[in-house]
Image (spheres, rainbow, N blue to C red):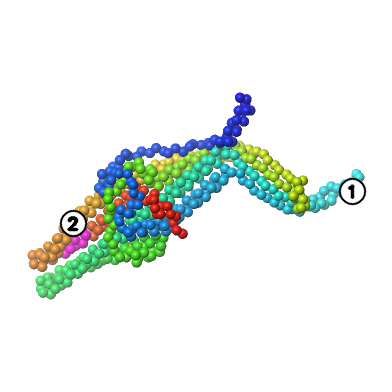
Amino acid sequence: MRRSSWTSFVISTLLLSGCAVGPNYKRPQVAVPRQWTVAAARGTSAKPIEKEEWWSSFQDAELSSLIERAAKQNLDLKLALERVEEARAARGIARSAYFPSIDASASATRNRQRVIAPVVPGSVKIVPAEFNNFQGGLGASWELDVFGGIRRGVQAASADVAAAEENGRDVRVILLGDVGRVYAQLRGFQRRLEIANKNIKTQQDTLDLTRARAKAGLATELDVSRAAAQLESTKAVVPTLLGGIDVSIHRLSVLLGEEPGALKSELENASPIPAAGPDVEVGLPSDLLERRPDIRRSEAQLAAATARIGEAKADLFPRFVLTGAAGRQASQLHDITLGAGNFFSVGPGISLPLFTGGRIRSNIAVQNAREREALVSYQSSVLNALEEVQDALVNYAQEQERRDRLNEAAQQSQVAVDLATEQYKAGLTDFLSVLDAQRELYADEDQAVQSRTNVTTDVIALYRALGGGWNVGSAVATTKPTP
């Protein structure tokens, strides 16, 4: 094949198919353990995760209602979805470079010029001349993506869209977890308030009894003072618990996109702490690469950074542009429809950067550095996800053990209070034993409630660490939040 024919073949092939410079994206390899370190943690199962609506396992209608409303009304989620729309629009801008650009123009001018005009044979004179110029036409230009710069830009923009979508899913996972956590804390505060009020009543009865016995000479003023001090100490906890209830309601209201006190009438009545359902399905560590939106977001950002390397490298090569223009012009408006003033131009253009002061190569170095940064960020997100799941498994398992011990301690403390009270009335023990037993009972019951709350928040944290809630097949995941 002759050199000219071979050159024509290469050029035609490039024009038809393009050759995108720069590296192609490949998913990086990361080390992931085959099993969880605490795979046999209490309350968990190694089965693959099948149910995404983790909140339904608590069988709490109020919790389910709050989550559904939060998914529709939360402002952070709305913001994340608007960023998805922004990324899609930016991708449209990048894709527009694939196509020719066509524009129309029209003009009408009045011109005055000095011209040389003959006066008599052999003599000329410079005289002014005025004329109109009416012109209308079309212009077009089309850059051929020979070296793939446009294609790489579109790939980067598409990866940005994927990253924005995964960010929206990550916001949803965090949002649903926050709603569940704050709701459990609210019910925990309410239950602790009930226990405090119950102990206040018991301690008030004890104080009344002690005062009556002191008047009868069967008790001392020291006993009365100790009983009164313990009662006031227990009452001092109530404002803290009421404040915790109000703050939790405020937080839930804001998570639902409403004013801080909007849910007070709905949530002020106490309800049981939502109890965790059956064993949590945790699957395998490798499942996190597909389940966690933050990991997928980091991978999409890595893909975008890789594509931008090729986009930057394309600036080293020539740019091929086809341009054309056509139109009509006339000195009189009614003559514009005639063909005498037709004009056109068409042809290719090429531009090649010869000297840019190192700008192009510096830009390539910048994109390479950003690609390495994105790789490190991806590896870090995988490690952090593994750590969060492992920590959540440990916390959930250990808190269940603590809850059981505190429940048993509370039961034994109740028995101790009953025995101490009976023995004190019979004169078999001193009053200090009664106060100590009541103080220990209140402390054990309060800690037991806190532990039950922690068990619920820990299992919610586990669901969140596993990426639960991002891909539910309901309106929670698929419906755009209402404006």
Say what secondary structure mark 1 lies in: strand
Q: Which mark is residue 201?
A: none
Locate residue 135, reporting x and y percent: 72, 50
As rendered, which of 119 and 71 lies closer to the eye?
71
Mark 2 in CB contact with mark 1 (< 8 angstroms): no
Mark 1 crowdedness (10 Å alpha carbons): few <14, some 14-19, many ≥20: few
Work out whether residue 418 can be spotted. yes
Q: Which residue is mark 1?
A: 119
Q: Amino acid at mark 1?
A: Val
Q: Main secondary structure of the magenta part?
A: helix
2 or 1: tag closer to the N-terminus: 1
Residue 121 relative to residue 405: left or right: right
Query: Looking at the image, which residue is at 25% across and 64% down?
Result: 194
In space, the residues marked 2 and 1 are separated at their CA atoms by 125 Å
Q: Which residue is mark 2?
A: 409
Locate residue 229, reporting x and y percent: 20, 67
As rendered, which of 169 and 376 lies closer to the eye?
169
Q: How many marks?
A: 2
Residue range of the region highlighted in magenta in the rendering: 435-445
Instruction: Establish if 68 lies above or below 349.
Output: below
Residue 111 relative to residue 289: left or right: right
Q: Amino acid at mark 2?
A: Ala
